[in-house]
Amino acid sequence: MEILDSIFLNTKKIFLDLLGCWLPDWMILLVNIGIIIGVIAVLGPVIMMYLTLLERKIIGRMQNRIGPNRVGIFGILQPIADGIKMFTKEDIIPQNADKIVHFLAPVLMVIPALLAFAVLPFGRGMIPVNLNVGLLFFIAVSSTSTICVFMASWASRNKFSILGGMRSAAQMISYEIPMVLSVVPVILSAESLSTYAIVEAQARWSGLHWFVFTPWGLLAFIIFFLCGVAECNRSPFDLPEAESEIVAGFHTEYSGMKFALFYMAEYMNTFTVSALAATLFLGGWEGPVLPSWLWFFIKTHALIFVMFWFRGTLPRFRVDQLMGLAWKLFLPLTLINIFVAGGYHLISDRNFRVAGASAVLLVSFLLFTVFLNRKYMPEKRRYDLVD
Amino acid sequence: MFFGLGVLRGLMVTLKNFVTSYFMPPDRGGLFTVEYPEKRLPVIERFRNFPFLVYDKDPENPRCVACEICANECPTKCIYIEKDTDPNKKPLRRPAIFDIDITVCMNCGICEEVCPFDSIYMDHPFEVASSDRLEKLLFHKNDLLKSNDYFHKIRPTHAAAIDARRRAVEEKKKSAAVKPSETGQPPKAQNGGKP
Protein backbone atom coordinates (compact mmCIF):
# COMPACT_ATOMS: atom_id res chain seq x y z
CA MET A 1 0.00 0.00 0.00
CA GLU A 2 2.77 2.40 0.92
CA ILE A 3 4.41 1.81 -2.45
CA LEU A 4 1.18 2.48 -4.33
CA ASP A 5 0.41 5.43 -2.12
CA SER A 6 3.52 7.34 -3.08
CA ILE A 7 4.08 5.85 -6.53
CA PHE A 8 3.85 9.18 -8.35
CA LEU A 9 6.04 11.00 -5.83
CA ASN A 10 8.70 8.29 -6.00
CA THR A 11 8.67 8.24 -9.77
CA LYS A 12 9.29 11.97 -9.82
CA LYS A 13 12.01 11.63 -7.17
CA ILE A 14 13.84 8.90 -9.11
CA PHE A 15 13.64 10.97 -12.29
CA LEU A 16 14.99 14.05 -10.53
CA ASP A 17 17.76 12.02 -8.87
CA LEU A 18 18.81 10.74 -12.28
CA LEU A 19 18.89 14.28 -13.64
CA GLY A 20 20.88 15.33 -10.57
CA CYS A 21 23.86 13.39 -11.91
CA TRP A 22 24.31 15.95 -14.68
CA LEU A 23 22.47 19.11 -13.77
CA PRO A 24 23.18 21.68 -11.06
CA ASP A 25 20.81 22.08 -8.11
CA TRP A 26 18.99 25.15 -9.34
CA MET A 27 18.24 23.44 -12.63
CA ILE A 28 16.71 20.50 -10.74
CA LEU A 29 14.48 22.96 -8.92
CA LEU A 30 13.32 24.42 -12.23
CA VAL A 31 12.76 20.97 -13.71
CA ASN A 32 10.71 20.05 -10.65
CA ILE A 33 8.47 23.06 -11.19
CA GLY A 34 8.32 22.30 -14.90
CA ILE A 35 7.15 18.75 -14.26
CA ILE A 36 4.34 20.00 -12.00
CA ILE A 37 3.24 22.60 -14.55
CA GLY A 38 3.42 20.04 -17.33
CA VAL A 39 1.32 17.54 -15.42
CA ILE A 40 -1.38 20.13 -14.72
CA ALA A 41 -1.33 21.45 -18.28
CA VAL A 42 -1.82 17.93 -19.60
CA LEU A 43 -4.27 16.92 -16.89
CA GLY A 44 -6.68 19.78 -17.64
CA PRO A 45 -7.45 18.93 -21.28
CA VAL A 46 -7.40 15.19 -20.56
CA ILE A 47 -9.95 15.64 -17.79
CA MET A 48 -12.08 17.75 -20.08
CA MET A 49 -11.91 15.11 -22.79
CA TYR A 50 -12.98 12.16 -20.73
CA LEU A 51 -15.53 14.15 -18.71
CA THR A 52 -17.38 15.06 -21.91
CA LEU A 53 -17.51 11.39 -22.83
CA LEU A 54 -18.51 10.37 -19.32
CA GLU A 55 -21.28 12.94 -19.25
CA ARG A 56 -22.69 11.85 -22.58
CA LYS A 57 -22.57 8.22 -21.54
CA ILE A 58 -24.19 8.80 -18.14
CA ILE A 59 -26.89 11.13 -19.40
CA GLY A 60 -27.56 8.74 -22.24
CA ARG A 61 -28.12 5.92 -19.79
CA MET A 62 -30.41 8.11 -17.71
CA GLN A 63 -32.49 8.75 -20.82
CA ASN A 64 -32.40 5.05 -21.81
CA ARG A 65 -29.97 5.67 -24.63
CA ILE A 66 -26.58 4.09 -25.18
CA GLY A 67 -24.52 7.19 -25.74
CA PRO A 68 -21.51 7.46 -28.04
CA ASN A 69 -20.10 4.00 -28.80
CA ARG A 70 -18.88 4.14 -32.38
CA VAL A 71 -15.39 5.64 -32.18
CA GLY A 72 -13.14 3.11 -30.53
CA ILE A 73 -14.31 0.53 -28.01
CA PHE A 74 -17.14 1.97 -25.86
CA GLY A 75 -16.55 5.24 -27.73
CA ILE A 76 -13.40 6.11 -25.81
CA LEU A 77 -11.91 7.87 -28.82
CA GLN A 78 -15.00 10.07 -29.26
CA PRO A 79 -13.39 13.10 -27.53
CA ILE A 80 -10.45 12.92 -29.95
CA ALA A 81 -12.82 12.82 -32.92
CA ASP A 82 -14.66 15.81 -31.45
CA GLY A 83 -11.37 17.62 -30.96
CA ILE A 84 -10.36 17.07 -34.57
CA LYS A 85 -13.74 18.34 -35.68
CA MET A 86 -13.37 21.45 -33.51
CA PHE A 87 -9.90 22.16 -34.87
CA THR A 88 -11.00 21.96 -38.47
CA LYS A 89 -14.07 24.14 -38.08
CA GLU A 90 -14.15 27.67 -39.37
CA ASP A 91 -13.35 30.35 -36.83
CA ILE A 92 -16.03 33.02 -37.25
CA ILE A 93 -15.67 36.52 -35.84
CA PRO A 94 -18.71 38.78 -36.20
CA GLN A 95 -18.13 41.84 -38.31
CA ASN A 96 -18.95 44.33 -35.58
CA ALA A 97 -17.32 42.41 -32.77
CA ASP A 98 -14.54 43.84 -30.64
CA LYS A 99 -11.97 41.59 -32.24
CA ILE A 100 -9.25 41.72 -29.59
CA VAL A 101 -11.56 41.07 -26.66
CA HIS A 102 -13.46 38.50 -28.67
CA PHE A 103 -10.20 36.63 -29.16
CA LEU A 104 -8.93 37.12 -25.61
CA ALA A 105 -12.04 35.94 -23.75
CA PRO A 106 -11.82 32.19 -24.45
CA VAL A 107 -8.07 32.20 -23.94
CA LEU A 108 -8.33 33.94 -20.58
CA MET A 109 -11.23 31.71 -19.61
CA VAL A 110 -8.97 28.66 -19.46
CA ILE A 111 -6.38 30.34 -17.19
CA PRO A 112 -8.42 30.49 -13.94
CA ALA A 113 -9.67 26.97 -14.62
CA LEU A 114 -6.08 25.73 -14.86
CA LEU A 115 -4.83 27.86 -11.97
CA ALA A 116 -7.41 26.32 -9.66
CA PHE A 117 -5.62 22.98 -10.05
CA ALA A 118 -2.60 24.43 -8.27
CA VAL A 119 -4.03 24.12 -4.76
CA LEU A 120 -5.82 20.79 -5.08
CA PRO A 121 -4.30 18.05 -2.91
CA PHE A 122 -4.41 15.02 -5.20
CA GLY A 123 -2.94 12.66 -2.62
CA ARG A 124 -0.64 12.41 0.37
CA GLY A 125 2.15 14.86 -0.41
CA MET A 126 0.78 15.38 -3.91
CA ILE A 127 -0.17 19.03 -3.92
CA PRO A 128 1.25 21.25 -6.66
CA VAL A 129 1.66 24.31 -4.41
CA ASN A 130 0.96 24.09 -0.70
CA LEU A 131 -0.20 27.69 -0.31
CA ASN A 132 -1.10 28.73 3.23
CA VAL A 133 -4.02 30.66 1.72
CA GLY A 134 -4.92 27.92 -0.73
CA LEU A 135 -8.67 28.08 -0.19
CA LEU A 136 -8.73 31.83 -0.59
CA PHE A 137 -6.63 31.49 -3.72
CA PHE A 138 -9.07 28.96 -5.17
CA ILE A 139 -12.11 31.12 -4.50
CA ALA A 140 -10.46 34.26 -5.82
CA VAL A 141 -9.21 32.59 -8.97
CA SER A 142 -12.37 30.69 -9.80
CA SER A 143 -14.51 33.80 -9.53
CA THR A 144 -12.42 35.64 -12.15
CA SER A 145 -13.87 33.43 -14.86
CA THR A 146 -16.97 35.63 -14.68
CA ILE A 147 -14.92 38.46 -16.16
CA CYS A 148 -14.00 36.29 -19.12
CA VAL A 149 -17.62 35.28 -19.62
CA PHE A 150 -18.63 38.90 -19.59
CA MET A 151 -15.78 39.82 -21.95
CA ALA A 152 -16.98 37.19 -24.37
CA SER A 153 -20.57 38.35 -24.20
CA TRP A 154 -19.69 42.02 -24.52
CA ALA A 155 -17.25 41.58 -27.37
CA SER A 156 -19.66 39.49 -29.42
CA ARG A 157 -22.03 42.44 -29.88
CA ASN A 158 -25.04 40.19 -29.87
CA LYS A 159 -28.15 40.63 -27.77
CA PHE A 160 -28.27 37.00 -26.71
CA SER A 161 -24.63 37.07 -25.73
CA ILE A 162 -25.04 40.14 -23.60
CA LEU A 163 -28.09 38.67 -21.90
CA GLY A 164 -26.09 35.57 -21.11
CA GLY A 165 -23.23 37.63 -19.79
CA MET A 166 -25.52 39.71 -17.59
CA ARG A 167 -27.10 36.58 -16.20
CA SER A 168 -23.69 35.07 -15.58
CA ALA A 169 -22.54 38.14 -13.65
CA ALA A 170 -25.70 38.25 -11.55
CA GLN A 171 -25.49 34.55 -10.84
CA MET A 172 -21.83 34.65 -9.88
CA ILE A 173 -22.30 37.53 -7.47
CA SER A 174 -25.26 35.79 -5.85
CA TYR A 175 -23.63 32.41 -5.48
CA GLU A 176 -20.14 33.53 -4.58
CA ILE A 177 -21.33 34.82 -1.22
CA PRO A 178 -22.99 31.69 0.19
CA MET A 179 -20.16 29.65 -1.31
CA VAL A 180 -17.52 31.55 0.62
CA LEU A 181 -19.60 31.69 3.78
CA SER A 182 -20.28 27.96 3.71
CA VAL A 183 -16.53 27.36 3.78
CA VAL A 184 -16.02 29.43 6.95
CA PRO A 185 -17.04 26.62 9.40
CA VAL A 186 -14.45 24.37 7.76
CA ILE A 187 -11.76 27.00 8.22
CA LEU A 188 -12.93 27.40 11.81
CA SER A 189 -12.57 23.73 12.47
CA ALA A 190 -9.32 23.13 10.60
CA GLU A 191 -7.78 26.41 11.80
CA SER A 192 -6.12 26.84 8.45
CA LEU A 193 -6.77 28.10 4.93
CA SER A 194 -4.37 25.62 3.39
CA THR A 195 -6.21 22.86 1.55
CA TYR A 196 -3.54 20.39 2.61
CA ALA A 197 -4.01 21.23 6.30
CA ILE A 198 -7.80 21.01 5.92
CA VAL A 199 -7.46 17.46 4.60
CA GLU A 200 -5.11 16.54 7.43
CA ALA A 201 -7.61 17.91 9.94
CA GLN A 202 -10.02 15.18 8.78
CA ALA A 203 -7.51 12.37 9.33
CA ARG A 204 -8.82 10.94 12.63
CA TRP A 205 -10.97 7.77 12.90
CA SER A 206 -8.56 6.09 10.45
CA GLY A 207 -9.27 8.71 7.82
CA LEU A 208 -13.05 8.86 8.18
CA HIS A 209 -13.39 11.96 10.37
CA TRP A 210 -14.91 13.90 7.50
CA PHE A 211 -16.52 17.26 8.08
CA VAL A 212 -19.62 16.11 6.24
CA PHE A 213 -20.46 13.84 9.19
CA THR A 214 -21.13 16.82 11.46
CA PRO A 215 -24.45 18.72 11.32
CA TRP A 216 -22.88 21.98 10.24
CA GLY A 217 -20.61 20.13 7.84
CA LEU A 218 -23.52 18.43 6.10
CA LEU A 219 -25.38 21.69 5.61
CA ALA A 220 -22.25 23.53 4.48
CA PHE A 221 -21.41 20.70 2.10
CA ILE A 222 -24.83 20.79 0.45
CA ILE A 223 -24.76 24.56 0.10
CA PHE A 224 -21.16 24.58 -1.11
CA PHE A 225 -21.84 21.91 -3.68
CA LEU A 226 -24.98 23.57 -5.03
CA CYS A 227 -23.16 26.90 -5.22
CA GLY A 228 -20.33 25.11 -6.97
CA VAL A 229 -22.75 23.78 -9.55
CA ALA A 230 -23.94 27.34 -10.06
CA GLU A 231 -20.33 28.55 -10.24
CA CYS A 232 -19.47 26.38 -13.21
CA ASN A 233 -22.73 27.18 -15.03
CA ARG A 234 -24.03 23.67 -15.02
CA SER A 235 -27.64 22.58 -15.16
CA PRO A 236 -29.97 23.44 -13.37
CA PHE A 237 -28.10 26.71 -12.95
CA ASP A 238 -27.10 27.05 -16.62
CA LEU A 239 -28.94 30.29 -17.21
CA PRO A 240 -25.98 32.04 -18.91
CA GLU A 241 -26.11 29.50 -21.71
CA ALA A 242 -29.80 28.62 -21.68
CA GLU A 243 -30.40 27.15 -25.13
CA SER A 244 -34.16 27.42 -25.01
CA GLU A 245 -34.11 31.10 -24.09
CA ILE A 246 -31.01 32.85 -25.40
CA VAL A 247 -29.60 30.60 -28.16
CA ALA A 248 -26.29 29.68 -26.52
CA GLY A 249 -25.83 32.57 -24.15
CA PHE A 250 -22.40 34.10 -23.92
CA HIS A 251 -20.84 31.77 -26.49
CA THR A 252 -23.44 32.32 -29.19
CA GLU A 253 -20.89 33.96 -31.49
CA TYR A 254 -18.08 31.49 -30.91
CA SER A 255 -17.18 28.61 -33.15
CA GLY A 256 -14.44 26.10 -33.64
CA MET A 257 -11.57 26.03 -31.20
CA LYS A 258 -12.68 29.10 -29.25
CA PHE A 259 -15.94 27.41 -28.45
CA ALA A 260 -14.00 24.32 -27.46
CA LEU A 261 -11.96 26.44 -25.06
CA PHE A 262 -15.12 27.59 -23.31
CA TYR A 263 -16.16 24.00 -23.08
CA MET A 264 -12.80 23.00 -21.73
CA ALA A 265 -12.94 25.69 -19.05
CA GLU A 266 -16.42 24.57 -18.05
CA TYR A 267 -15.42 20.95 -17.62
CA MET A 268 -12.21 21.79 -15.81
CA ASN A 269 -14.26 23.97 -13.45
CA THR A 270 -16.59 21.04 -12.91
CA PHE A 271 -13.64 18.92 -11.91
CA THR A 272 -11.97 21.49 -9.68
CA VAL A 273 -15.18 22.43 -7.85
CA SER A 274 -15.99 18.77 -7.22
CA ALA A 275 -12.43 18.16 -6.12
CA LEU A 276 -12.54 21.09 -3.73
CA ALA A 277 -15.87 19.98 -2.29
CA ALA A 278 -14.36 16.54 -1.75
CA THR A 279 -11.29 18.13 -0.15
CA LEU A 280 -13.18 20.37 2.22
CA PHE A 281 -15.99 18.11 3.32
CA LEU A 282 -15.36 14.52 2.24
CA GLY A 283 -11.86 14.23 3.66
CA GLY A 284 -9.96 14.72 0.40
CA TRP A 285 -7.42 11.93 0.03
CA GLU A 286 -8.05 10.59 3.55
CA GLY A 287 -9.59 7.16 3.72
CA PRO A 288 -8.90 3.60 4.81
CA VAL A 289 -7.23 0.80 2.81
CA LEU A 290 -7.01 2.32 -0.69
CA PRO A 291 -4.13 4.59 -1.81
CA SER A 292 -4.68 8.26 -1.07
CA TRP A 293 -4.82 9.51 -4.67
CA LEU A 294 -7.39 6.81 -5.51
CA TRP A 295 -9.58 7.99 -2.65
CA PHE A 296 -9.35 11.53 -3.94
CA PHE A 297 -10.39 10.54 -7.45
CA ILE A 298 -13.21 8.30 -6.22
CA LYS A 299 -14.70 11.10 -4.12
CA THR A 300 -14.27 13.68 -6.86
CA HIS A 301 -15.90 11.49 -9.45
CA ALA A 302 -18.76 10.65 -7.15
CA LEU A 303 -19.48 14.38 -6.92
CA ILE A 304 -19.04 14.81 -10.67
CA PHE A 305 -21.53 12.00 -11.16
CA VAL A 306 -23.99 13.92 -8.97
CA MET A 307 -23.50 16.95 -11.20
CA PHE A 308 -24.26 14.87 -14.29
CA TRP A 309 -27.21 13.40 -12.44
CA PHE A 310 -28.58 16.90 -11.81
CA ARG A 311 -28.09 17.67 -15.46
CA GLY A 312 -30.04 14.59 -16.45
CA THR A 313 -32.88 15.31 -14.06
CA LEU A 314 -33.62 18.91 -13.26
CA PRO A 315 -35.10 21.57 -15.50
CA ARG A 316 -33.52 24.99 -15.60
CA PHE A 317 -34.32 27.54 -12.89
CA ARG A 318 -36.18 30.71 -13.60
CA VAL A 319 -34.07 33.81 -12.92
CA ASP A 320 -36.08 34.84 -9.86
CA GLN A 321 -35.97 31.30 -8.46
CA LEU A 322 -32.22 31.28 -8.94
CA MET A 323 -31.80 34.55 -7.08
CA GLY A 324 -34.32 33.58 -4.41
CA LEU A 325 -32.50 30.35 -3.67
CA ALA A 326 -29.18 32.12 -3.17
CA TRP A 327 -30.32 35.17 -1.23
CA LYS A 328 -33.32 33.90 0.67
CA LEU A 329 -32.23 30.39 1.60
CA PHE A 330 -28.52 29.79 1.22
CA LEU A 331 -27.24 33.10 2.56
CA PRO A 332 -29.19 33.14 5.87
CA LEU A 333 -28.53 29.44 6.37
CA THR A 334 -24.78 29.85 5.93
CA LEU A 335 -24.74 32.78 8.34
CA ILE A 336 -26.52 30.74 11.00
CA ASN A 337 -24.31 27.79 10.18
CA ILE A 338 -21.20 29.78 11.10
CA PHE A 339 -22.59 30.51 14.56
CA VAL A 340 -23.71 26.92 15.00
CA ALA A 341 -20.25 25.68 14.05
CA GLY A 342 -18.71 28.12 16.56
CA GLY A 343 -21.00 26.87 19.33
CA TYR A 344 -20.29 23.29 18.32
CA HIS A 345 -16.61 23.78 19.01
CA LEU A 346 -17.21 25.48 22.36
CA ILE A 347 -19.40 22.69 23.77
CA SER A 348 -17.43 19.59 24.68
CA ASP A 349 -20.26 17.11 25.34
CA ARG A 350 -20.54 15.22 22.04
CA ASN A 351 -24.16 14.05 22.10
CA PHE A 352 -25.45 17.37 23.28
CA ARG A 353 -23.62 19.41 20.69
CA VAL A 354 -24.64 17.15 17.80
CA ALA A 355 -28.28 17.23 18.87
CA GLY A 356 -28.22 20.95 19.53
CA ALA A 357 -26.57 21.84 16.26
CA SER A 358 -28.92 19.60 14.29
CA ALA A 359 -31.96 21.07 16.02
CA VAL A 360 -30.92 24.68 15.42
CA LEU A 361 -30.11 24.04 11.76
CA LEU A 362 -33.30 22.09 11.12
CA VAL A 363 -35.45 24.76 12.74
CA SER A 364 -33.75 27.55 10.84
CA PHE A 365 -34.04 25.60 7.59
CA LEU A 366 -37.77 25.18 8.04
CA LEU A 367 -38.09 28.77 9.16
CA PHE A 368 -36.37 30.08 6.06
CA THR A 369 -38.12 27.79 3.64
CA VAL A 370 -41.51 28.68 5.05
CA PHE A 371 -41.23 32.34 5.96
CA LEU A 372 -38.67 33.75 3.59
CA ASN A 373 -39.91 31.80 0.61
CA ARG A 374 -43.62 32.24 1.05
CA LYS A 375 -45.54 33.27 -2.02
CA TYR A 376 -45.14 36.92 -2.72
CA MET A 377 -47.65 38.72 -4.83
CA PRO A 378 -46.80 42.29 -5.74
CA GLU A 379 -49.67 44.70 -5.09
CA LYS A 380 -51.85 45.36 -8.06
CA ARG A 381 -51.45 48.73 -9.66
CA ARG A 382 -53.73 50.45 -12.05
CA TYR A 383 -52.56 53.02 -14.49
CA ASP A 384 -55.52 55.01 -15.72
CA LEU A 385 -54.95 56.23 -19.19
CA VAL A 386 -54.71 59.95 -19.45
CA ASP A 387 -57.16 61.41 -21.88
CA MET B 1 -44.81 20.37 2.49
CA PHE B 2 -41.07 19.78 2.64
CA PHE B 3 -38.96 21.88 0.39
CA GLY B 4 -37.13 19.82 -2.21
CA LEU B 5 -38.92 16.52 -1.80
CA GLY B 6 -40.12 16.58 -5.39
CA VAL B 7 -36.57 17.19 -6.55
CA LEU B 8 -35.38 14.12 -4.68
CA ARG B 9 -38.16 12.04 -6.17
CA GLY B 10 -37.17 13.21 -9.65
CA LEU B 11 -33.56 12.36 -8.94
CA MET B 12 -34.56 8.84 -7.94
CA VAL B 13 -36.38 8.38 -11.25
CA THR B 14 -33.28 9.16 -13.30
CA LEU B 15 -31.08 7.07 -11.01
CA LYS B 16 -33.42 4.13 -11.48
CA ASN B 17 -33.24 4.59 -15.24
CA PHE B 18 -29.45 4.74 -15.06
CA VAL B 19 -29.13 1.54 -13.03
CA THR B 20 -31.77 -0.50 -14.84
CA SER B 21 -30.30 0.39 -18.23
CA TYR B 22 -27.33 -1.82 -17.37
CA PHE B 23 -29.06 -4.88 -15.95
CA MET B 24 -32.67 -5.08 -17.03
CA PRO B 25 -34.37 -6.27 -20.22
CA PRO B 26 -36.04 -3.58 -22.34
CA ASP B 27 -39.54 -4.14 -20.99
CA ARG B 28 -38.39 -3.53 -17.42
CA GLY B 29 -36.50 -0.31 -17.80
CA GLY B 30 -33.54 -1.53 -19.83
CA LEU B 31 -32.23 -0.21 -23.11
CA PHE B 32 -34.43 -0.79 -26.13
CA THR B 33 -32.01 0.48 -28.74
CA VAL B 34 -31.16 -1.99 -31.52
CA GLU B 35 -27.73 -1.09 -32.87
CA TYR B 36 -28.90 -1.24 -36.46
CA PRO B 37 -26.13 -2.15 -38.89
CA GLU B 38 -24.83 -4.91 -36.60
CA LYS B 39 -28.07 -6.13 -35.14
CA ARG B 40 -31.42 -5.86 -36.83
CA LEU B 41 -35.01 -6.63 -36.05
CA PRO B 42 -36.66 -9.23 -38.29
CA VAL B 43 -38.73 -7.67 -41.07
CA ILE B 44 -42.38 -8.40 -40.39
CA GLU B 45 -44.41 -10.19 -43.03
CA ARG B 46 -46.69 -7.28 -43.82
CA PHE B 47 -43.84 -4.86 -44.41
CA ARG B 48 -44.20 -3.38 -47.90
CA ASN B 49 -41.49 -1.60 -49.82
CA PHE B 50 -40.62 -1.12 -53.49
CA PRO B 51 -42.54 -3.30 -55.98
CA PHE B 52 -41.29 -6.42 -57.75
CA LEU B 53 -42.66 -8.67 -60.48
CA VAL B 54 -43.59 -12.30 -59.92
CA TYR B 55 -42.89 -15.14 -62.38
CA ASP B 56 -44.12 -18.66 -61.89
CA LYS B 57 -41.54 -20.92 -63.48
CA ASP B 58 -39.59 -19.07 -66.09
CA PRO B 59 -38.37 -15.45 -65.89
CA GLU B 60 -38.94 -15.18 -69.64
CA ASN B 61 -42.68 -15.66 -69.12
CA PRO B 62 -43.73 -13.54 -66.19
CA ARG B 63 -47.29 -13.17 -64.99
CA CYS B 64 -47.19 -9.61 -66.27
CA VAL B 65 -48.95 -9.11 -69.59
CA ALA B 66 -47.81 -5.50 -70.06
CA CYS B 67 -51.33 -4.16 -69.76
CA GLU B 68 -49.97 -0.89 -68.32
CA ILE B 69 -52.72 -0.53 -65.73
CA CYS B 70 -50.13 -0.11 -62.98
CA ALA B 71 -48.21 2.44 -65.06
CA ASN B 72 -51.39 4.44 -65.57
CA GLU B 73 -52.55 4.21 -61.98
CA CYS B 74 -49.14 5.03 -60.47
CA PRO B 75 -49.52 8.43 -58.78
CA THR B 76 -45.89 9.36 -59.32
CA LYS B 77 -45.65 7.80 -62.78
CA CYS B 78 -42.51 5.92 -61.91
CA ILE B 79 -43.34 2.80 -63.99
CA TYR B 80 -42.42 2.59 -67.65
CA ILE B 81 -43.57 -0.38 -69.72
CA GLU B 82 -43.06 -1.40 -73.36
CA LYS B 83 -44.81 -4.41 -74.84
CA ASP B 84 -42.71 -7.16 -76.37
CA THR B 85 -43.27 -7.95 -80.04
CA ASP B 86 -42.70 -11.00 -82.15
CA PRO B 87 -40.58 -10.80 -85.33
CA ASN B 88 -43.66 -9.73 -87.29
CA LYS B 89 -44.13 -6.66 -85.08
CA LYS B 90 -47.20 -8.23 -83.55
CA PRO B 91 -47.47 -7.32 -79.87
CA LEU B 92 -47.08 -10.12 -77.33
CA ARG B 93 -48.59 -10.45 -73.88
CA ARG B 94 -45.34 -9.81 -72.00
CA PRO B 95 -43.21 -6.77 -71.32
CA ALA B 96 -40.03 -6.02 -73.22
CA ILE B 97 -39.10 -3.15 -70.91
CA PHE B 98 -40.37 -2.81 -67.37
CA ASP B 99 -38.62 -0.02 -65.49
CA ILE B 100 -39.39 1.35 -62.03
CA ASP B 101 -37.58 4.48 -60.95
CA ILE B 102 -37.40 3.93 -57.22
CA THR B 103 -36.09 7.42 -56.59
CA VAL B 104 -39.61 8.50 -57.58
CA CYS B 105 -41.60 5.57 -56.20
CA MET B 106 -43.32 6.42 -52.93
CA ASN B 107 -44.20 2.86 -51.85
CA CYS B 108 -47.94 3.51 -51.96
CA GLY B 109 -48.76 0.02 -53.24
CA ILE B 110 -51.44 1.12 -55.69
CA CYS B 111 -49.77 -0.93 -58.45
CA GLU B 112 -50.25 -4.02 -56.31
CA GLU B 113 -53.91 -3.10 -55.72
CA VAL B 114 -54.83 -2.57 -59.34
CA CYS B 115 -52.93 -5.41 -61.00
CA PRO B 116 -55.52 -7.89 -62.38
CA PHE B 117 -52.89 -10.56 -63.12
CA ASP B 118 -51.41 -10.93 -59.59
CA SER B 119 -48.12 -9.90 -61.05
CA ILE B 120 -46.75 -6.91 -59.17
CA TYR B 121 -46.25 -6.99 -55.41
CA MET B 122 -44.51 -4.95 -52.78
CA ASP B 123 -41.09 -6.24 -51.74
CA HIS B 124 -39.17 -6.43 -48.44
CA PRO B 125 -35.62 -5.14 -49.01
CA PHE B 126 -35.22 -1.54 -47.90
CA GLU B 127 -31.46 -0.99 -48.06
CA VAL B 128 -31.37 0.21 -51.65
CA ALA B 129 -29.26 3.32 -51.11
CA SER B 130 -26.65 3.86 -53.78
CA SER B 131 -24.30 6.57 -54.93
CA ASP B 132 -25.33 6.02 -58.56
CA ARG B 133 -28.75 7.54 -59.02
CA LEU B 134 -29.19 6.84 -62.71
CA GLU B 135 -28.01 3.23 -62.88
CA LYS B 136 -28.52 1.61 -59.49
CA LEU B 137 -31.76 3.29 -58.52
CA LEU B 138 -33.57 2.62 -61.80
CA PHE B 139 -34.77 -0.98 -61.52
CA HIS B 140 -35.03 -2.80 -64.85
CA LYS B 141 -37.01 -5.89 -65.66
CA ASN B 142 -34.21 -8.23 -64.61
CA ASP B 143 -33.89 -6.55 -61.22
CA LEU B 144 -37.62 -6.63 -60.67
CA LEU B 145 -38.41 -10.21 -61.69
CA LYS B 146 -38.45 -12.54 -58.70
CA SER B 147 -39.81 -16.05 -58.43
CA ASN B 148 -43.03 -17.06 -56.77
CA ASP B 149 -40.92 -19.01 -54.27
CA TYR B 150 -39.35 -15.78 -53.17
CA PHE B 151 -42.82 -14.31 -52.73
CA HIS B 152 -43.72 -17.31 -50.59
CA LYS B 153 -40.59 -16.77 -48.55
CA ILE B 154 -41.22 -13.11 -47.70
CA ARG B 155 -45.04 -13.18 -47.35
CA PRO B 156 -46.19 -16.78 -46.83
CA THR B 157 -49.83 -16.15 -45.92
CA HIS B 158 -50.50 -13.61 -48.65
CA ALA B 159 -48.74 -15.69 -51.32
CA ALA B 160 -50.56 -18.87 -50.27
CA ALA B 161 -53.95 -17.14 -50.48
CA ILE B 162 -53.19 -15.80 -53.93
CA ASP B 163 -51.94 -19.17 -55.15
CA ALA B 164 -55.10 -20.85 -53.88
CA ARG B 165 -57.25 -18.34 -55.68
CA ARG B 166 -55.30 -18.68 -58.89
CA ARG B 167 -55.55 -22.46 -58.70
CA ALA B 168 -59.34 -22.23 -58.20
CA VAL B 169 -59.68 -19.99 -61.24
CA GLU B 170 -57.49 -22.39 -63.19
CA GLU B 171 -59.71 -25.37 -62.23
CA LYS B 172 -62.84 -23.49 -63.14
CA LYS B 173 -61.36 -22.66 -66.53
CA LYS B 174 -60.49 -26.31 -67.13
CA SER B 175 -63.92 -27.60 -66.15
CA ALA B 176 -65.53 -24.93 -68.30
CA ALA B 177 -63.38 -25.99 -71.23
CA VAL B 178 -64.46 -29.61 -70.80
CA LYS B 179 -68.21 -28.92 -70.46
CA PRO B 180 -68.92 -25.46 -71.88
CA SER B 181 -72.66 -26.18 -72.25
CA GLU B 182 -73.26 -26.67 -68.53
CA THR B 183 -72.07 -23.34 -67.30
CA GLY B 184 -73.14 -21.50 -70.40
CA GLN B 185 -70.75 -18.65 -69.82
CA PRO B 186 -67.06 -18.35 -70.64
CA PRO B 187 -64.97 -18.15 -67.43
CA LYS B 188 -63.41 -14.87 -66.49
CA ALA B 189 -60.34 -14.19 -64.43
CA GLN B 190 -61.67 -12.52 -61.36
CA ASN B 191 -59.63 -10.13 -59.32
CA GLY B 192 -62.04 -9.43 -56.51
CA GLY B 193 -61.27 -10.07 -52.87
CA LYS B 194 -57.52 -9.96 -52.67
CA PRO B 195 -56.36 -10.60 -49.11
Image: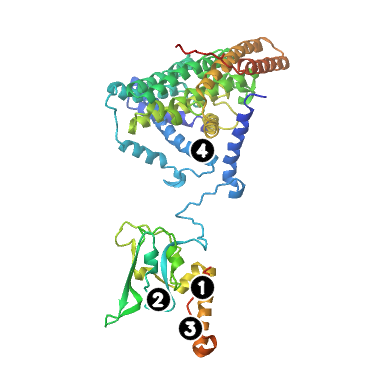
Question: Which residue type does callout 3 highlight?
Answer: Pro
Q: Nearer the viewer, residue A183 or B28?
A: B28
Q: Quadrant of residue A106?
A: top left
Pick whichever, A119 or B110, lies toward us: B110
CA gap, disc 4 to disc 3?
71 Å
Q: From this view, report whether residue A102 is shown above or below residue B191.
A: above
The answer as to whether the residues below labels 1 and 3 share one chain is yes
Residue A115 image position (x, y, % from top left): 41, 22
Chain letter behind tag 4: A
Label 4 vs label 2: CA separation? 56 Å
Q: Which residue is mark 3?
A: B186
At x 70% / y 16%, what residue is drawn? A359
Looking at the rendered structure, the kind of residue marked 1 is Ile
Query: Where's the C terminus of chain A, which quadrant?
Result: top left
Per the model, the C-alpha gap separating discs 4 and 1 is: 51 Å
Mark nearer the viewer, 4 or 3: 3
Mark 3, chain letter?
B
Q: Which residue is mark 4?
A: A59
Q: Which quarter of the picture shows residue A217?
A: top right
Q: Secondary structure at mark 2?
A: loop
Residue A249, percent from left and from top: 41, 27
- For image coordinates 51% across by 79% down, the residue present is B169
Q: Amino acid at mark 4?
A: Ile
Q: What is the secondary structure assignment of the residue under circle 1?
A: helix
Q: Position of residue B23 (x, y in %)?
A: 59, 46
Q: Characterize the local packing of mark 4: few (<14), some (14-19) or many (20 or more) Cα atoms within 10 angstroms.
A: many
Q: Amino acid at mark 2?
A: Pro
Question: Quick check: A344 left or right of B112?
Answer: right
Contact check, label 3 and label 2, Cβ < 8 Å: no
Q: Which mark is residue B62?
A: 2
